[in-house]
Image (cartoon, rainbow, N blue to C red):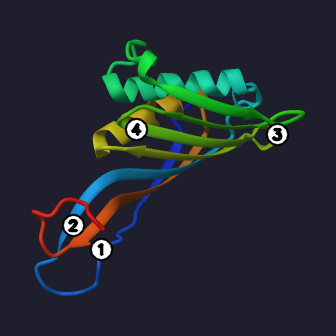
Amino acid sequence: MRTEAICQVERLSMCPTQQGAIKRCIWWYHLIAEFWNSPFELLAEAPVVEAALKDALASGINGNGNGKGLHEIRAISYQFKPFGVSAQVNSGTAQIYIHTWPEKGYSAIDILAENKDQAYKILEKLQENLQPQAVYIAELERGLAQEDPNKGGET
């Protein structure tokens, strides 16, 4: 019997401390996730992990997880011996990185997406796919502070 995972979220602010009319240009939403107590078989082998990531990314891109848009997703993974995986999947609008320790039921995950809703849709699908019993999330807004919001993201 599976129950709803325990989930803790922290929102971290990286805003500048200067006073004045400084605006923030947000380019990416970054979720740093830790999943605990996932089933061993979902974390041990690269093809299984890669499929879970592709499915989650497709869900975040399309919003419905119907598999359309998979042609836009690129993936690379490394299989550790005897088990464990490092993998990365990306599209033009989002990316996921994962490192798994199946013997501990643990995975460390980074989700970067163009907007907050997309990042959380990906996270939700990953939770469904990897079935953790506990989840910890740190949320960051990635971007630059700048005095003139009309200037793009030039450095």
Which is nearer the N-term, disc 2 or disc 3? 2
Label located before the other in sequence (2 or 4): 2
Q: Name the mark nearer the viewer: 3 or 4.
A: 4
Q: Which of marks 1 and 3 is in front?
A: 1
Name which residue lies at 71% across and 30% down: 39
For residue 130, above or below residue 145? above
Q: Mark 2 to mark 3: distance in Å?
A: 42 Å
Indicate left or right for 139 with 89 as reference. left
Would you name the residue on which mark 4 appears? Answer: 94
**Image quarter hosting the C terminus:** bottom left
Q: Where is residue 132 in the image (x, y as percent from the top left)?
A: 61, 37
Amino acid type assigned to the residue bearing label 1 in the image: Cys
The three-letter code of the residue at mark 2 reads: Arg
Res 80 label: none
- Distance from label 1 to label 2 (Cα)? 8 Å
- Please tell me how crowded label 1 is: few (under 14), some (14-19), or many (20+) other residues with Cα within 10 Å: some
